[in-house]
Amino acid sequence: MQGPALTCPQQRSVPGDVFPNSGWPQDELQATPQTRLADASYMVAYTLRNWITPRAGRGKDMSAFDQDDLGNMHKWLEGLAANFPAAQNELKDLLAQVQAAKSYHKDLCVSDWLHSVAAIEAVLGTSPPTAPGSCTTDTCRVWTLFHFMSLAKRHNVTGAVSAQETVESITAFITAFFRCEHCRKHALEQLGAKAYGQEEMIQKGADGLPIYLWRFHNAVSVRIAAEGSCPGDRRWPPPDLCPACWSKSEEEWDVLYEAKQIFSERAGGGLNAGGAIPDEVKVLEFLDKAFGLS
């Protein structure tokens, strides 16, 4: 199956000699923790209504979620309600609704689900944010949501679950509810391979999980750019957003090298893994600042 059509982002010049250019827009420099939270909040509400739907099956009543659906919903909501820093009461109510149906082995009517989702929409909103620095794609918004979830323990979100539980929650969401089959297949391939130091970083807990999701995000962004022969460098953050995050190097970054190997027989395998190496201590400091709300 072919992936969605790709429009290459416009490349722009960046200061210094580490990157030849950046494939991230100038508007990225205007993003704040508040604009990022607005992006993630919109995506929470949007996906609950539009992505979480009963999975089709022969003879299945599509007006209700069955036990298989509820299992995936429960796993996702466990992580989301615990780790997302907004609408926590409403998300926990939604989790309780799913838990009750699951515990009593009852189907959950889609109409009842959507009624509960409306309470979350009332808090998080139903319109894509348009402030300077806001995401312009659902892909950006989903990754922003994942980054917030990965930082919950570090940012003292009450009740945040462990790194392992967070990854399991995100994996359930990708497996059951991603609307892009191409994206789902590739994401699960990398998750299944435990790529990018997954196990090591999960064991590091609150300090490791944000870096693992950040590595994963970079591997995806750079590989997709390579699939489309896009000239802009898609490593994030760009050097004018975090000058201390990167240093020039002739060596290949092991994260991108691993992505290159995974996709070696496909278009994404042509990605450039060299030119710059990250300082992950500085990256973690950047992530704390970029997604920190206190």
Image (cartoon, helix red, strand yellow):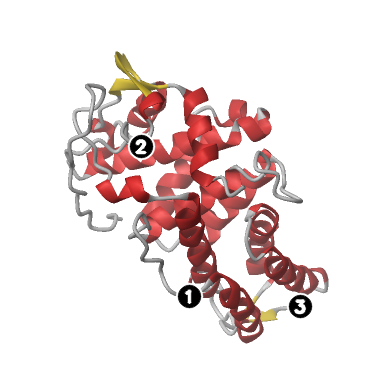
- Distance from label 3 to label 1 (Cα)? 29 Å
Q: Is residue 206 above or below residue 69?
A: above
- Amino acid type, callout 3: Lys
Q: Is residue 194 visible?
A: no
Residue in the foreground of this view, choosing between 210 and 185: 210
Q: Position of residue 121 (x, y in %)?
A: 56, 75
For label 2, the SS is: loop
Residue 172 occupies quadrant? bottom right
For label 3, the SS is: loop
Residue in the foreground of this view, choosing between 5 and 26: 26
Residue in the foreground of this view, choosing between 168 and 218: 218
Say which residue appears at 46% left-offset and 60% top-offset.
39
- Distance from label 2 to label 1 (Cα)? 29 Å
For label 1, the SS is: loop
Dot 2 or dot 1: first in sequence order is: 1
Label 1, residues with CA under 10 Å away: few <14, some 14-19, many ≥20:
some
Q: Which mark is residue 241?
A: 2
Q: Quick check: marks 2 and 1 in contact, CB under 8 Å?
A: no
Residue 180 occupies quadrant? bottom left
- Amino acid type, callout 1: Thr
Residue that badge 1 annotates: 126
Dot 3 or dot 2: first in sequence order is: 3
Residue that badge 3 annotates: 106
- Amino acid type, callout 2: Leu
Say left or right for 75 vs 183: right
Q: Position of residue 109 (x, y in %)?
A: 66, 83
Front label number (2 vs 1):
2
Say which residue appears at 37% left-offset and 41% top-offset.
220
